[in-house]
Amino acid sequence: MKIFFKILISIWASYHLFCIWVLPNAGGFVGRYFADEIVPYGNAISMNTPWNLFSPDPANTMYFASIVHYDEAHTSSDMEQFFPPEKSQIVTDSSERRLLYAMRYLVLDPRRIEVILGPWLCRLHPGALEVSIRYIMEKIPSYDLVLISPDKSVQQLKVTEESSSQFFTCNGAGS
């Protein structure tokens, strides 16, 4: 009987240590895989408090693409530009990062694009008739998707979503 209790306590101690190791990052791959077995136990002893050691959804790359139209025909003289200009490149300079934060601020409310970004682009380009702006987001693939697709790079797994273009008339704003 004594050996039975030793085995039982050893099994419980191993299970408990496994829960201590997995539950802080329950949103990770191992935590989701064993969730049915360990989450009820973690909830019962108030140990299921996630720490989020890793970013569960990394910041997606977002930017605006705008085309400034100088004539009605929308000819090749129209120029495309990006906001922020770095587009999907890594930015380390703090003054350039401000553009990234400004872009995220504009995205939170589409009216800001109409009120702030459209008129600003018209003022930057005197003589422009209109500006078309579209929002582009490059979604970073999840860790699970990267794991099940070892033959593809992260760049190949990225999904790009684009909004439809919004047009802003520059009559009087840019000239």
Image: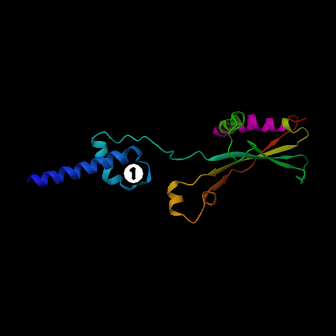
Residue 173 at what x, y percent from top left?
Answer: 85, 34
Judge left or right: residue 112 versus residue 47. Answer: right
Q: Which residues are magenta?
A: 106-122
- Camera-nearest residue between 41 and 6: 6
- Res 119 quadrant in image: top right
Judge left or right: residue 114 versus residue 169. Answer: left
Tell me if residue 107 is in the magenta stretch: yes
Q: Residue at x 35, y 42 (%)?
A: 48
- Res 98 quadrant in image: top right
Q: How is the image coloured?
A: rainbow
In the rendered image, which quarter contains the C terminus?
A: top right
- Camera-nearest residue between 99 and 108: 99
Residue lying furthest left: 1
Quickly name the residue at label 1: 31
Q: Residue at x 87, y 38 (%)?
A: 171
Judge left or right: residue 28 versus residue 89. Answer: left
Q: Residues within 10 Å of mark 1 (few under 14, many from 20)?
A: some
Residue 101 at what x, y percent from top left?
Answer: 66, 36
Tell me if residue 7 is in the magenta stretch: no
Q: Residue at x 65, y 53 (%)?
A: 161
Q: Residue at x 27, y 40 (%)?
A: 45
Prevailing secondary structure of the magenta residues: helix
Q: Is residue 175 above or below residue 149?
A: above
Amino acid carrying label 1: it is Gly
Judge left or right: residue 144 versus residue 126. Answer: left
Label 1's element? helix
Residue 133 at what x, y percent from top left?
Answer: 76, 46
| Count of numbered labels shown in the rendering | 1
In the rendered image, which quarter contains the N terminus?
A: bottom left
- Res 46 quadrant in image: top left
Residue 138 at what x, y percent from top left?
Answer: 64, 51
